[in-house]
Image: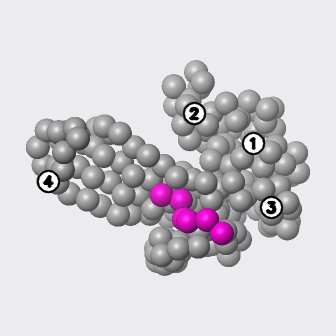
Amino acid sequence: MRAVVIGGMNLDILGVPHKALLARDSNPGKITLRPGGVGRNIAKRLHDLGTKTQLITALGNDDRASLLAHLCQRDGVDLSLALQTDRPAPCYLCIHDEMGDMAVAVNDMSAMERLTPEKLESRLSAVNAADACVLDANLPEDTLAFIAKNASVPLILDPVSCAKAPRVKPVLLHLTAIKPNRLEAEA
C-alpha cells in the first residue's frame, strides 16, 4: 500500500510546570521539543504500519525546518515531495498545567499558506499514483478544493481543530472518510 499525506508538520514545544501553573510568572518545569503536526503524525503512523508514505508539507527556511527534516528522515517520513518555503517552519507552543492538561497554546502555521493549488499541481501525479491520500485542514481552503477536484484516489481528511473544521464543508462530498472529534464535527 502507498499513501500520500498532505498537511502540516511543525515543531512542538511543550511545557509542563512541576507545581500548579502560576499565570504571569516563570514556572519551573520541563520543556520538551518534538516533531509534530497532524499531517506529519499521520505519515509517521502510516509508515510504522508498513505503508509506503510520502508527506507533502510546507518546510520552513530556518533551523527548525532543518531539525524537522532530520527527525523525519530518522523516523522514515519521506519528504521528497515537500515544498521549501520562504517562511519559518511551522511551530506549536503549548503550556500544560501540572496535571498534563493543556492550559494554553499558540501555533504559527503561516508557512502552510504556501501550499497553493499552483504549487501542488506538479505533485498531483504522485498523489494519483498512490492508493489513498490523507489531507488535514491546515491546508488553505482553495488547496483543499483543488485536491478534492483533481485527486482520483480515495481522500481521507482530518479537520485538525474547531477553528479549521469549517474549511472542510465545501469538499465533504469528495471525501471517502473524515475523522473529526465531537467538537470538530459540531463545527
Kindly report which numbered mark, 2 or 4, lies closer to the viewer in this rendering: 4
Badge 2 marks a residue whose secondary structure is loop
At label 4, the amino acid type is: Pro
Q: Image height check: is 14 above or below 171?
A: below
Q: Which residue is mark 3?
A: 120
- First along the sequence among labels 2 and 1: 1
Q: Which residue is mark 2?
A: 163
At label 3, the amino acid type is: Leu
At label 1, the amino acid type is: Glu
Could you give the CA–CA distance between mark 2 and mark 1, rounded to whole angstroms? 13 Å
Numbered-mark total: 4
Q: Image height check: is 148 above or below 2?
A: above
Could you give the CA–CA distance between mark 3 and mark 1, rounded to whole angstroms? 13 Å
Spot the residue most to the top.
186
Residue 129 visible from this viewpoint: no
- The numbered disc on residue 141 is 1
Could you give the CA–CA distance between mark 3 and mark 4, rounded to whole angstroms? 44 Å
- First along the sequence among labels 3 and 1: 3
Mark 3 surroundings: few (<14), some (14-19) or many (≥20) residues within 10 A: many
- Residue 127 in percent (x, y) is at 79, 61
Find residue 110 and report its image quarter: bottom right
Left or right placement of residue 182 versus residue 14 in this view: right
At label 2, the amino acid type is: Ala
Q: Which residue is mark 4?
A: 28
- First along the sequence among labels 1 and 4: 4
What segment is highlighted magenta in the picture?
Answer: 86-91
- Does the CB distance between marks 3 and 2 fall below 8 Å? no
- Residue 126 in percent (x, y) is at 80, 67
User: At 88% across and 45% down in the image, what residue appears?
Assistant: 149
- Residue 131 in percent (x, y) is at 75, 58
